[in-house]
Structure formats: structure tokens, C-alpha cells
Amino acid sequence: MRVAVLGAGAWGTALAVLLASKGVPTRLWARRKAQAEALQAMRENRDYLPGVAIPAYLYPTHDPEEALEGAELAVVAVPSKALRETLAVLPPAPWYVSATKGLFYGGEGVRTPAEVVEALTQRPVVALSGPNHAEEVARFLPTASVAAGPEDLARRVQALFSGPTFRVYTSRDRRGVELGGAVKNVLALAAGMVDGLRLGDNAKAALLTRGLREMVRFGTALGGEEATFYGLAGLGDLLATAYSLHSRNRMAGENLVRGVDREALEARGVVEGLYAVKAMVAWGKEQGVELPVAEAVHRVAHEGLDPLAALKALMAREPKEE
């Protein structure tokens, strides 16, 4: 099987390295020509995954036609905000694996990346999501993930990606898997804010536990299965993202409360939680659903509320049963 990986950031490169290391002919499409040339010359992604060698079966390219020529499937690993414009300029693949985590909200309600890919390409799509930091996947540290979508294709993704250090489970709950992957980024921003304010482990544990309930409330209201949010793509991904030094979203939350502006936060990559929280809060207001943690993150990140004031508001909420 020949595979095209679309997006040469850390995650796209890590997935391409994973596949190529198994002997799968893989082409890695880079949006910028200079980046593709550097990847070819150095056999290393020094911008996003320094120190990780590019295997022989991995060929970087800037040419969309070359990337997708003969590919049996395409793995989409671009930031959510670039998803539509990227697919608009690329030739179609027979089917897709969406490795993008994010949320879209508009006239059609909340949509996930796989749903957007499916609508734009009219091709089948499997979502791949879990506690998978690119830095660790590319260095072959053990982890697990979930391939969610049509059963036959999910099993093909399972077989394609599974190996000694990357265990893949299957699920039919694609929407739940993707919603978990998006919401955990919002909660990771909140966790980073707790770290930045040095509020302690108790505060962080309490926030994430209540945040998990918020993930379940949001996700099940949008059609996800409750059990999914307690699995790898929900709780598992949340734990990895909210505690890791690799986590872009956790670090962004920490830096936000220290006065770093949003433009500087995204200088080296998109912080997906900053976009997902907008979709969550807009949906919650429209539907009359309380999402207090997401609302607090939104007010700090997008409205300039003092983070300690946001904390005070959360702590002063009406007492209730757990």
C-alpha cells in the first residue's frame, strides 16, 4: 500500500515516519516548497521533530500531484483552520484518514474534521485519535490510538498503523472519538492556566475531573457515545495533553496567564484549543447548555478576563451534587 501524508508538521511527520519504518512507501506533502526541500536534503524535520531521522521509505514533496499519485489513501494531518483550503488544492484520494483534531461551528452546527473531509471529498473517512504526542510516536515510545469509522476501513487502518510501539483499537463512534480529541485541547488550556498560576495539583485534578464531565455532556449531546469519552480518545488523550511538557495546548494555557499574546503562542504551530473553545461556547449558548470550564477558558483566552477572576467565578458557582 502506498500512502500520502498531508501536512509536514510534527504530527504528520511522526505518522509518516511510523508508516515508512514499517516499509510502507509513504509520501509526505509539505505546504511550503522550502520545507520539502529541507526535508529531502537533511532527512530530518528540524523545524518540528529535530533529531528524528526520516526513513528510506519516506519521500517528502511539495508537489500535490506527486504526493497523491498512486496513493491508496491519504492521511490528513494539517491544522483544522487550514483543512478546507488544503483539500481544495489537492487531488482526491480513494479514501482518507483524518488525524486532525478540532471543531467547526456554523450554519450546519458542530462539525468534526472527518466530517469536513468527507463533505469536501465525497470519500470515506476514518478518524485516528488518542494520547499520541508526535515527539514520542516518532521516537517509537509505546502508545495506543483509536481508528474510528466504517468497520472495514477502521480495521484496515488498524492493520496499517499497528506495530510494536503503536497499538490501534477500532471504534464505530467516529463522532465521539473526534469530539473527545477536540475538547481535551480546551481542557489542556485550562490545565496550563492552573500550572501558570501555580495553583497546585489539587486544583488541576478538580478542574480536569469536572472538565471531563463537561466533555461527556457536550459530546453525548452531539451524538457521541458516553463510553468513548472514558476511553483512549477522551480521558486517555486528556491525561496526555493536560500533563505533558510536549503539549502545545497545555503550554499555551500556561503562557496565556503569564501575559504572552495569542499570536506569539502560535508562532511555532496552531493551538487547536483556542479555536475549539469558540465552537464549544457558541454551541452552548445557542443550545442553552452550561459549559463552565469552556466558558472560563474562552473568557480568559478571547475576552481578556483576568484568570484569577475566572477561577473565582468557577469556585463561586452554586453548590450541587456531584
Image (spheres, helix red, strand yellow):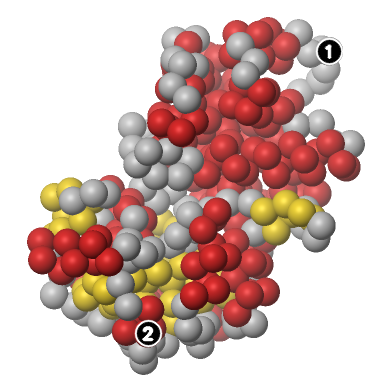
Q: Quadrant of the N terminus?
A: bottom left
Q: Nearer the viewer, mark 1 or mark 2?
A: 2
Please name the residue shown 43% across and 71% down the image.
75
Please name the residue shown 42% across and 38% down the image.
266
The label on residue 183 is: none
Visible in this render: residue 154?
no
Q: What is the distance, in whole Å, between disc 1 and disc 2 at their CAs?
A: 58 Å
Label 2 is placed on what type of residue? Answer: Glu
Q: Quadrant of the C terminus?
A: top right
Residue picked out by circle 2: 65
Q: Position of residue 316 (x, y in %)?
A: 76, 8
First of labels 1, 2 by sequence position: 2
How many discs mark residues in the rendered view? 2
Where disc 1 sits, the SS reads loop
Visible in this render: residue 56?
yes
| For residue 65, side relative to residue 199 (left or right) | left
Residue picked out by circle 1: 318
Kindly give the residue lying farthest to the bottom in the view shown. 70
Please name the residue shown 48% across and 41% down the image.
271
Label 1 is placed on what type of residue? Answer: Glu
